[in-house]
Image (cartoon, grey):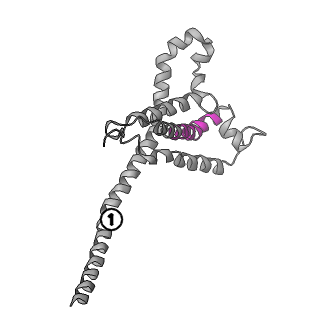
Amino acid sequence: MFRSCVLLCNRCLRCVSTEARYADIPMRTVSRLGKLGIWLLQLLVATLAVPVATALLYYSFKPVLLIFTSDSFVRTDAILSLRLFPFQAMVAFGCAWRLARNDENLGADPVTRFVWIAPLIWWLFLIAVRQHQLVPGETRWQHFLWSRSADALRIQIISTMPLITALAYALGNYWGNRRRRPSCGTDGDQE
Protein backbone atom coordinates (compact mmCIF):
# COMPACT_ATOMS: atom_id res chain seq x y z
CA MET A 1 0.00 0.00 0.00
CA PHE A 2 2.75 2.42 0.97
CA ARG A 3 4.74 1.53 -2.15
CA SER A 4 1.78 2.17 -4.45
CA CYS A 5 1.16 5.51 -2.74
CA VAL A 6 4.80 6.53 -3.29
CA LEU A 7 4.61 5.48 -6.95
CA LEU A 8 1.37 7.39 -7.37
CA CYS A 9 2.86 10.51 -5.75
CA ASN A 10 5.98 10.29 -7.90
CA ARG A 11 3.83 9.98 -10.99
CA CYS A 12 1.78 13.01 -9.96
CA LEU A 13 4.92 15.00 -9.20
CA ARG A 14 6.24 14.18 -12.64
CA CYS A 15 2.97 15.31 -14.19
CA VAL A 16 2.89 18.48 -12.15
CA SER A 17 6.49 19.28 -12.93
CA THR A 18 5.84 18.65 -16.64
CA GLU A 19 2.77 20.89 -16.56
CA ALA A 20 4.66 23.51 -14.62
CA ARG A 21 7.52 23.31 -17.08
CA TYR A 22 5.25 24.02 -20.05
CA ALA A 23 2.93 26.45 -18.26
CA ASP A 24 5.40 29.33 -18.57
CA ILE A 25 5.83 29.04 -22.36
CA PRO A 26 3.47 31.99 -23.02
CA MET A 27 5.37 34.07 -20.46
CA ARG A 28 8.71 33.18 -22.07
CA THR A 29 7.30 34.12 -25.48
CA VAL A 30 6.02 37.43 -24.15
CA SER A 31 9.36 38.02 -22.47
CA ARG A 32 11.23 37.31 -25.70
CA LEU A 33 8.89 39.57 -27.68
CA GLY A 34 9.41 42.25 -25.04
CA LYS A 35 13.18 41.91 -25.37
CA LEU A 36 12.85 42.15 -29.15
CA GLY A 37 10.69 45.26 -28.75
CA ILE A 38 13.24 46.86 -26.43
CA TRP A 39 16.03 45.97 -28.86
CA LEU A 40 14.13 47.49 -31.80
CA LEU A 41 13.36 50.63 -29.81
CA GLN A 42 16.99 51.02 -28.79
CA LEU A 43 18.06 50.35 -32.39
CA LEU A 44 15.79 53.14 -33.63
CA VAL A 45 17.15 55.48 -30.99
CA ALA A 46 20.76 54.59 -31.83
CA THR A 47 20.43 54.81 -35.62
CA LEU A 48 17.73 57.43 -36.24
CA ALA A 49 17.11 59.55 -33.16
CA VAL A 50 20.77 60.14 -32.33
CA PRO A 51 21.68 61.62 -35.75
CA VAL A 52 18.58 63.84 -35.65
CA ALA A 53 19.40 64.94 -32.08
CA THR A 54 22.98 65.59 -33.15
CA ALA A 55 21.86 67.82 -35.99
CA LEU A 56 19.46 69.70 -33.70
CA LEU A 57 22.19 70.10 -31.10
CA TYR A 58 24.63 71.33 -33.73
CA TYR A 59 22.21 73.87 -35.19
CA SER A 60 21.31 75.17 -31.74
CA PHE A 61 25.00 75.83 -30.96
CA LYS A 62 25.96 76.95 -34.47
CA PRO A 63 25.87 80.70 -33.62
CA VAL A 64 28.29 80.10 -30.74
CA LEU A 65 30.53 77.97 -32.96
CA LEU A 66 30.70 80.79 -35.51
CA ILE A 67 32.48 82.89 -32.91
CA PHE A 68 35.20 80.34 -32.17
CA THR A 69 35.82 78.52 -35.48
CA SER A 70 36.32 79.41 -39.11
CA ASP A 71 33.29 80.70 -40.91
CA SER A 72 33.51 78.30 -43.85
CA PHE A 73 33.85 75.23 -41.61
CA VAL A 74 30.64 76.00 -39.72
CA ARG A 75 28.62 77.37 -42.63
CA THR A 76 29.14 74.24 -44.74
CA ASP A 77 28.11 72.01 -41.83
CA ALA A 78 31.36 70.08 -42.17
CA ILE A 79 31.22 69.09 -38.49
CA LEU A 80 28.25 66.82 -39.22
CA SER A 81 30.08 65.04 -42.03
CA LEU A 82 33.53 64.46 -40.55
CA ARG A 83 35.10 61.08 -41.23
CA LEU A 84 33.69 58.34 -39.01
CA PHE A 85 31.12 60.81 -37.63
CA PRO A 86 32.73 61.61 -34.25
CA PHE A 87 30.12 64.19 -33.22
CA GLN A 88 27.28 61.70 -33.71
CA ALA A 89 29.26 59.02 -31.87
CA MET A 90 29.78 61.31 -28.87
CA VAL A 91 26.07 62.14 -28.72
CA ALA A 92 25.16 58.43 -29.02
CA PHE A 93 27.58 57.49 -26.25
CA GLY A 94 26.30 60.28 -24.00
CA CYS A 95 22.63 59.44 -24.58
CA ALA A 96 23.12 55.74 -23.89
CA TRP A 97 25.33 56.39 -20.88
CA ARG A 98 22.77 58.79 -19.37
CA LEU A 99 19.89 56.42 -20.08
CA ALA A 100 21.75 53.48 -18.55
CA ARG A 101 22.64 55.46 -15.44
CA ASN A 102 19.18 56.82 -14.73
CA ASP A 103 16.59 54.46 -16.21
CA GLU A 104 15.93 51.29 -14.28
CA ASN A 105 13.95 49.56 -17.04
CA LEU A 106 14.97 50.54 -20.54
CA GLY A 107 18.58 51.51 -19.91
CA ALA A 108 19.39 48.51 -17.73
CA ASP A 109 18.27 45.93 -20.26
CA PRO A 110 21.25 43.92 -21.55
CA VAL A 111 19.80 43.59 -25.08
CA THR A 112 20.77 47.22 -25.64
CA ARG A 113 24.38 46.14 -25.87
CA PHE A 114 23.56 44.28 -29.09
CA VAL A 115 22.07 47.16 -31.12
CA TRP A 116 25.22 47.25 -33.25
CA ILE A 117 24.55 43.86 -34.87
CA ALA A 118 21.85 44.97 -37.35
CA PRO A 119 23.80 48.04 -38.57
CA LEU A 120 26.92 45.88 -38.94
CA ILE A 121 25.01 43.38 -41.09
CA TRP A 122 23.61 46.27 -43.15
CA TRP A 123 27.09 47.81 -43.55
CA LEU A 124 28.67 44.52 -44.60
CA PHE A 125 25.82 43.87 -47.05
CA LEU A 126 26.33 47.28 -48.68
CA ILE A 127 30.06 46.70 -48.92
CA ALA A 128 29.48 43.27 -50.49
CA VAL A 129 27.01 44.48 -53.13
CA ARG A 130 29.02 47.57 -54.08
CA GLN A 131 30.18 46.71 -57.59
CA HIS A 132 31.39 49.76 -59.43
CA GLN A 133 34.29 51.98 -58.54
CA LEU A 134 33.63 55.71 -58.95
CA VAL A 135 37.04 56.94 -57.87
CA PRO A 136 40.00 55.20 -59.56
CA GLY A 137 42.27 53.41 -57.12
CA GLU A 138 39.74 53.52 -54.27
CA THR A 139 38.84 50.28 -52.48
CA ARG A 140 35.47 49.47 -51.00
CA TRP A 141 36.80 50.04 -47.48
CA GLN A 142 38.12 53.47 -48.41
CA HIS A 143 34.83 54.34 -50.07
CA PHE A 144 32.80 53.40 -47.00
CA LEU A 145 35.17 54.83 -44.39
CA TRP A 146 37.57 57.50 -45.64
CA SER A 147 36.50 58.86 -49.02
CA ARG A 148 35.25 62.44 -49.20
CA SER A 149 33.53 62.27 -52.59
CA ALA A 150 29.86 63.25 -52.70
CA ASP A 151 28.77 59.71 -53.61
CA ALA A 152 30.81 58.23 -50.80
CA LEU A 153 29.37 60.68 -48.28
CA ARG A 154 25.81 59.77 -49.27
CA ILE A 155 26.61 56.08 -48.85
CA GLN A 156 28.42 56.68 -45.55
CA ILE A 157 25.38 58.49 -44.13
CA ILE A 158 23.14 55.46 -44.72
CA SER A 159 25.73 52.80 -43.89
CA THR A 160 28.67 53.93 -41.79
CA MET A 161 26.90 56.49 -39.59
CA PRO A 162 24.28 54.01 -38.28
CA LEU A 163 27.07 51.53 -37.53
CA ILE A 164 29.23 54.10 -35.72
CA THR A 165 26.32 55.51 -33.70
CA ALA A 166 25.06 52.03 -32.77
CA LEU A 167 28.53 50.97 -31.64
CA ALA A 168 28.91 54.12 -29.56
CA TYR A 169 25.39 53.65 -28.17
CA ALA A 170 26.12 50.08 -27.12
CA LEU A 171 29.43 51.12 -25.56
CA GLY A 172 27.74 53.98 -23.70
CA ASN A 173 25.09 51.60 -22.39
CA TYR A 174 27.71 49.13 -21.26
CA TRP A 175 29.79 51.80 -19.54
CA GLY A 176 26.72 53.39 -17.93
CA ASN A 177 25.53 50.09 -16.53
CA ARG A 178 29.00 49.38 -15.12
CA ARG A 179 28.95 52.72 -13.31
CA ARG A 180 25.29 52.57 -12.28
CA ARG A 181 24.32 54.15 -9.00
CA PRO A 182 22.52 51.70 -6.73
CA SER A 183 18.80 52.30 -6.47
CA CYS A 184 17.12 52.97 -3.13
CA GLY A 185 16.08 49.37 -2.49
CA THR A 186 19.41 47.72 -3.32
CA ASP A 187 21.90 49.61 -1.21
CA GLY A 188 22.90 46.55 0.81
CA ASP A 189 22.42 48.23 4.20
CA GLN A 190 19.05 46.61 4.73
CA GLU A 191 18.96 43.37 6.67
Q: What segment is highlighted magenta in the picture? A: 151-170
Characterize the local packing of mark 1: few (<14), some (14-19) or many (20 or more) Cα atoms within 10 angstroms: few
Q: In which quarter of the image is the C terminus?
A: top left
The picture places residue 179, in percent across and down from the top left corner, at 47, 35
55 relative to 38, above or below:
above
169, 156: nearer the viewer? 169
Amino acid on which disc 1 is placed = Ile
- Seen in the image, is 136 located left or right of residue 6? right
191 relative to 74, above or below:
below
Q: Quadrant of the N terminus?
A: bottom left
The picture places residue 151, in percent across and down from the top left corner, at 64, 35
Taking the magenta stretch, the answer to whether it contains residue 149 is no
Q: Mark 1 points at which residue?
A: 25
Quarter assignment of residue 98: top left
Q: Which residue lies furthest to the top in this view?
A: 67
155, 101: nearer the viewer? 101
11, 96: nearer the viewer? 11
